[in-house]
Image (cartoon, coloured by chain):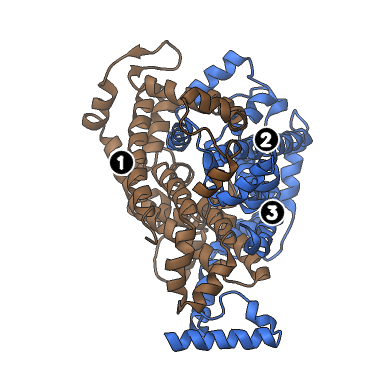
Chain colours: A brown, B blue
């Protein structure tokens, strides 16, 4: 708000600067009335459960009996006494450092390229690219594409063309399963971030491109860097946070495709490990502790990436 | 560069004088033909990679039983049949609860939860994006942080809260928790950040209340955002079997019923399983197509905002 407006508007425009906090709250009561309904649902169904889970991380809790306080025991066990947890961390890091950034870049790249298309084609392209992420169940088709017998599409064709002699047990073989999961994860990756970027691109004022062209922006990359990206910082931050969440918590794809547990835990991720302990072994305390560690790792990743993104275009 | 600018200006001027509409087509000067061809190629190739598994899923749902186990496998179906879909509905009609009840439950829950979430989360996002009020930073950071706590361990505490509220086995347990989802508020706040302060302030000078500003100025300005949020929200609620709080068969949702059918019918897994998956995909897909075309149409108005 400019000083000029402040001076002319007086009471109307002054949102309560230089007053006590209580006066500021009272002055902005309409704003709080807009926030409160959401806040009630958010606190009851999201904040309370998270706080309770963080607390459970310091206990032994088998869901049936009351939790017993165990201090840092769960955290010590995780890093010193649980080999599978370390496999899970390694696999999760593969997803965060390889599929995460690739997915994020693909989301933006395709949103940007599709946005250039004529309107009718644009709709069709958006449907095709978003469709994998749209469906909850259809990704299980990969189970049949990489089926371990000769009836599976991949094995069948490789045998027919003489490239392999016997069917490969793709998703059951530790040598291949993680690579296939990466492929499927990439196939599913044009999701939340992708649509948010498309919506964000719709909001950029077209006149900016016109004047930039006249000001000497020569090609599409200059235009991207000087106009499109700086205009999209809020959406880029949103997409990054959603990407961090998605890559740190890969689980559904691993469980449905590589099995639960996967062969020799080769496709175990932190979240499948949490599910193994929480839902199958009824060690909810230990599972919550792992969720706490995952939570802190995501917060750190989020801090680093958000800081980097705020520099875009500056 | 100076001469280039001058030339562009001249071209533009000539076109405006001769009322050549192409002068107003966006981004004319920064696109090379070679680049456009390359972009189209990239889009077509990756588009095929994205679409093929889906086509295969659709084709598989049309395959008769004897075509599923053949060697060498065929991608396409030779004698398409609706047997899998018919089987799916025969199995479902033998269920204890009529199948239409699951469909009603899913549609009712998904529509009511989505519309409430979009309105309530957007209403909260507006002050958090645009008003300088005490506590807004804390509220917003807690919302973003809560996204990072995996739901696989919060379901027990959630169950305890639901039980305390006495909402186990009610529609409320299905509809109310998604209203407080963090994603919606985060998305809406990010888009509302871009609304120019000047238009909000001038409405304020005209004496409009915050509620009025929210409905008449803020929401129309972020139409692509809340349309997109509608897709996300509907899709996540629709695909969620939501088994934690419901033990009453009559209140179960479609994905839960489908899972029961598929696991109870192991022989023709590929065919019936894919028929169920394709059937479940249809409602969110239709909604997506309807809404996404509107998201893209809002483009036309982008120039007049602010």
**Relative depth, front residue between A235 and B111:** A235
Where does the image place residue A29, in percent across and percent down from the top left? 59, 28
Where does the image place residue B279, in percent across and percent down from the top left? 69, 48
In what quadrant of the picture does the C terminus of chain A appear?
A: bottom left
Residue A57 in view of the camera: yes
Mark 3, chain letter? B
Q: Residues within 10 Å of mark 2 (few under 14, many from 20)?
A: some
Q: Is residue B75 left or right of residue A245?
A: right
Q: Residues within 10 Å of mark 3 (few under 14, many from 20)?
A: some
**Image vertical order of residue A194 relative to residue B217, above or below:** below
- Do discs 1 and 2 belong to a common subunit? no
Residue at 45% across, 62% down: A229
Q: Quadrant of residue A73?
A: top left
Badge 3 is on which residue? B291
Mark 2, chain letter? B
Badge 1 is on which residue? A89
Where does the image place residue B150, in percent across and percent down from the top left? 44, 34
From mark 3 to mark 1, how far is it between C-alphas?
Answer: 39 Å
What label does residue B100 carry, if any?
none
């Amino acid at each position: 708000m400019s000083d000029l407006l402040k001076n002319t508007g007086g009471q109307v425009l002054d949102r309560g600067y230089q007053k006590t906090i209580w006066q500021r709250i009272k002055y902005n009561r309409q704003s709080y009335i807009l926030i409160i309904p959401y806040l009630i649902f958010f606190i009851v169904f999201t904040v309370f459960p998270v706080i309770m889970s963080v607390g459970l991380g310091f206990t032994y809790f088998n869901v049936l009996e009351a939790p017993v306080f165990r201090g840092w025991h769960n955290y010590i066990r995780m890093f010193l006494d649980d080999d599978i947890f370390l496999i899970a961390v390694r696999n999760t890091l593969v997803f965060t450092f390889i599929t995460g950034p690739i997915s994020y870049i693909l989301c933006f790249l395709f949103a940007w390229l599709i946005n250039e298309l004529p309107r009718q084609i644009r709709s069709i392209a958006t449907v095709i690219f978003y469709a994998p992420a749209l469906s909850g169940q259809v990704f299980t088709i990969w189970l049949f594409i990489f089926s371990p017998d000769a009836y599976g599409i991949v094995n069948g064709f490789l045998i027919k063309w003489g490239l392999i002699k016997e069917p490969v047990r793709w998703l059951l073989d530790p040598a291949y399963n993680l690579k296939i999961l990466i492929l499927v994860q990439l196939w599913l990756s044009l999701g939340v971030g992708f649509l948010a970027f498309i919506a964000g691109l719709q909001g950029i004022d077209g006149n900016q491109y016109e004047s930039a062209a006249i000001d000497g922006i020569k090609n599409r990359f200059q235009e991207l860097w000087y106009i499109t990206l700086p205009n999209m910082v809020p959406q880029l931050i949103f997409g990054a946070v959603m990407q961090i969440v998605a890559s740190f918590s890969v689980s559904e794809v691993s469980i449905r495709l590589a099995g639960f547990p996967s062969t020799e835990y080769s496709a175990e991720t932190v979240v499948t490990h949490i599910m193994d302990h929480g839902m199958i072994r009824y060690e909810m305390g230990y599972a919550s502790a792992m969720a706490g560690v995952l939570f802190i790792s995501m917060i750190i990743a989020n801090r680093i990436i958000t800081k980097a993104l705020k520099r875009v275009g500056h | 560069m100076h001469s280039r600018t001058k030339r562009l200006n001249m071209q533009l001027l000539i076109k405006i004088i001769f009322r050549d509409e192409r002068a107003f087509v966006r981004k004319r000067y920064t696109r090379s033909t070679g680049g456009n061809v390359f972009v189209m190629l990239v889009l077509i190739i990756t588009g095929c990679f994205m679409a093929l598994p889906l086509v295969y899923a659709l084709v598989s749902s049309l395959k008769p039983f004897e075509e599923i186990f053949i060697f060498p496998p065929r991608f396409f179906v030779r004698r398409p049949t609706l047997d899998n879909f018919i089987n799916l509905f025969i199995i479902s009609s033998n269920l204890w609860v009529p199948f239409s009840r699951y469909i009603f439950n899913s549609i009712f829950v998904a529509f009511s939860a989505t519309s409430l979430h979009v309105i309530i989360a957007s209403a909260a996002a507006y002050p958090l994006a645009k008003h300088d009020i005490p506590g807004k930073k804390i509220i917003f950071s807690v919302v973003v942080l809560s996204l990072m706590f995996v739901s696989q361990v919060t379901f027990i505490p959630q169950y305890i809260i639901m039980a305390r509220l006495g909402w186990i086995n009610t529609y409320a347990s299905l509809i109310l928790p998604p209203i407080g989802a963090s994603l919606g508020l985060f998305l809406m706040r990010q888009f509302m950040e871009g609304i120019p302060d000047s238009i909000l302030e001038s409405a304020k000078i005209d004496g409009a209340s915050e509620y009025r500003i929210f409905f008449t100025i803020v929401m129309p300005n972020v139409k692509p955002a809340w349309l997109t949020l509608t897709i996300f929200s509907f899709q996540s609620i629709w695909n969620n079997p939501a088994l934690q709080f419901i033990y009453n068969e009559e209140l179960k949702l479609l994905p839960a019923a489908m899972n029961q059918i598929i696991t109870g019918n192991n022989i023709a897994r590929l065919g019936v399983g894919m028929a169920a998956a394709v059937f479940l995909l249809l409602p969110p897909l239709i909604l997506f197509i309807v809404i996404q075309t509107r998201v893209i149409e809002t483009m036309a108005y982008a120039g007049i905002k602010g």
